Amino acid sequence: MYTLLKRIFVGLAVMVGVLCAAQPALAQEGAEPAAPAANPTVTIGHFAPFAADVAGTAVDIKIDGTLVSAGMIYGYFAPDVAFAPGATLIELLAPGTETVLISTTTTTLEEDKRYYLLAIGAATEAFPLDLVWTERATTVPAGQALVTLGHLAPVAGLTAVNICTDDGELVVGNLAYGAPQANLPLTPGLHDWKIWVFGCSLGEVFDMPPFFIAEGDYRDAFAVGLRDSVIFPPNIVTTTGLMTFFNFLPTVLKAVAE
């Protein structure tokens, strides 16, 4: 049964703790042997507004032929699903049927690794339904923070964007639709960014609120939705939480948890 985690950030948002993958213990002289390698985990997100309404986006998800999620709808994600290492086939099917809407090519998942698997697209010629794999870091370098950013909004004319500081310094250039920038190192502290179409000064798309990221943090943020849509409004979705300041477009946390 689905559990909906919904938070709308108004003023100072509550920071949601990052789920950490199990790590093998360091072997020391005279100590117990290192722990066995952990299975890979995958956060599966459904960010594909491919139907006339949210209910119509429902899909069943199968892993190697086994049903792992029934009726997942747009805007939801299943965090840190444990997989067996090795070759893995993911299929999205029309609910309650064997009709495959889209499937991944068989992907080899490695022990002790963490991944995102994100369903995107609007089922149009320009933005077909697609599944995107992205590997995320399992550790954060000392003295730093890491963030994964994704442009997942199937909007005509926005095949790529630039993310810049409020002062006009480029953070991520040419962030392409459907190609998340994973494990971007950040200096811990306060960051204030804008999203642009050209450079850091032409065609402002979105003025992000200042956000704080602490040393050792791993965070993510994904732009989703359709332009001028009431049903699938433009939005920023995070599976890890962000500590933000000031009001801005509602950031909704939605998760599927057993």
Image: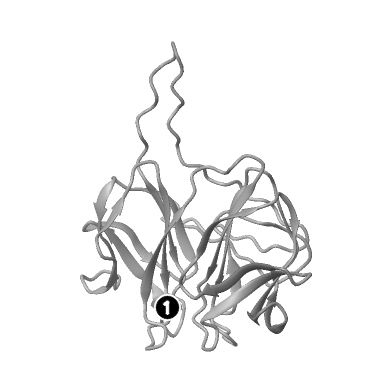
Q: Is residue 65 visible?
A: yes
Residue toward you, 201 or 147: 201
Give the residue drawn at x 52%, y 77%: 153
Residue 104 in the image: state x and y as whole percent.
Answer: 29, 66
Q: Is residue 257 above or below residue 149?
A: above
Q: Secondary structure at mark 1?
A: loop
Give the residue drawn at x 44%, y 85%: 52
Q: Is residue 202 above or below residue 2?
A: below
According to the picture, the residue beneath numbered tag 1 turns out to be 121
Residue 232 in the image: state x and y as whole percent.
Answer: 53, 79
Q: Label 1 crowding class (10 Å Cα cut-off): few <14, some 14-19, many 20+?
A: many
Residue 193 in the image: state x and y as whole percent.
Answer: 71, 68
Query: In the shown orientation, is residue 48 left or right of residue 235?
Result: left
Query: In the shown orientation, is residue 204 left or right of residue 96?
Result: right
Give the residue drawn at x 70%, y 62%: 9
Residue 55 in the image: state x and y as whole percent.
Answer: 43, 76
Q: Is residue 44 above or below residue 218?
A: below
Q: Is residue 258 visible?
A: no
